[in-house]
Image (cartoon, helix red, strand yellow):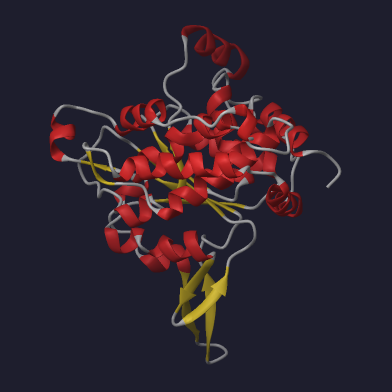
Amino acid sequence: MEKTIQQYRELLTDEIEKIIVGKRDQISLLIMSVFSGGHVLLDDLPGSGKTTLVKTLSLAMGCSFGRIQFTPDLLPSDILGMTVFNQKTGDFELRKGPVFTHLLLADEINRAIPRTQSALLEAMEERQATIDGSSLPLPAPFFVMATQNPVERESTFPLPAAQMDRFFIKMSLGYPTEEEENLMLVRLGSSIPFDQVHPVLSPEILRDITAQLDQIHVADAVREYMVSIVHGTRNHSQIETGASPRASKALFAGSRAWAAMDGRDFVTPDDVKAIAVPVLSHRITLRSQARFSHTEPEQIIREILDKTAVPAGAAL
């Protein structure tokens, strides 16, 4: 690897910002997830730039890209592929689906029926797809970037907890500020200049980055701090189901990536705090009383962060 992880983060950010105006914090979270090898759920209103962001990211990463528009009539075979009979040769041939790519955009994922949504479970966790009883490895690295509209509920099917837990982070872009929106119109006009985005990474570099994150030091006190936060979600009076051990692993890996992106070879409590909300908020289920009072999961995670003792600097 010719450059540091911090340098690759800066290069990737520069390319993405050729198209995406502002949103530096969200871009950093997205890059952190990619470096950690994690999947991303973009939960935002239509027209906020979710699809544009993912396509721009794929170009800058130098990886293959596939897109699936999720609809109620979509079948698992439309995602994974199938074996078909070739009348000319008299043999059955495997036709791989769009899941066989480096970066898969699952657009409006909550519009597909649960049976179809579940077709991604194995791919997201084990990086393989089973077609007619045969398990086939997916390209490495493999990422799912899914979008959903949080407002529109008609003809949608909420993602089950098992699938939500497989997303490394959940995030939203939100509306741009007036200044950002004016700049967007000046810079982009009525078209999106994807041809200006150049690849600054490659699948090989991404695999090297993920491997290098294993060298980032996590002190015992910081690791225990992460575990305390996750356990705080399991003991909170307003939470029915707390974060899983998979959430602890995501917080651990993401904190390492966040530290490396900042040019450090060790994790601090601030790294954990910076990513805790997008890593944990979608992995908890609130009790009915909390939902009726319009309490948001993000609010609960911030409350847990405020109440969890931060390890002293000497312990690091």
Q: Is residue 55 visible?
A: no
Q: Which residue is nearer to you in this view: 172 or 265? A: 265
**Quadrant location of residue 22?**
top right
Residue depicted at x 50% and y 87%: 87
Q: Residue at x 70, y 27 (%)?
A: 14
Report the residue at 69% width, 47% height from top.
213
Residue lying furthest front: 314
Position of residue 21 measured from the top left corner of the image (x, y, whole percent) = 58, 20
Q: 220 or 76, which is in the foreground? A: 220
> In the image, residue 137 lies at what x, y percent?
58, 70
- For the C terminus, the image quarter is top right
Seen as rendered, the residue at the extreme bottom is 90
Q: Does residue 142 show up?
A: yes
Q: Looking at the picture, does residue 46 appear above or below residue 252? A: above
- Left or right relative to 38: residue 62: right
- Residue sitting at the far right: 2
Residue at point 67% right, 29% down?
Answer: 13
7 sits left or right of 132 in the view: right
What is the number of callouts on the image?
Answer: 0
Q: Is residue 163 above or below residue 242?
A: below
Q: Position of residue 30 (x, y in %)?
A: 56, 37
| Relative horizontal placement of residue 205, taking residue 308 as reference (left or right) | right
Q: Which is nearer the eye, 176 or 275?
A: 275
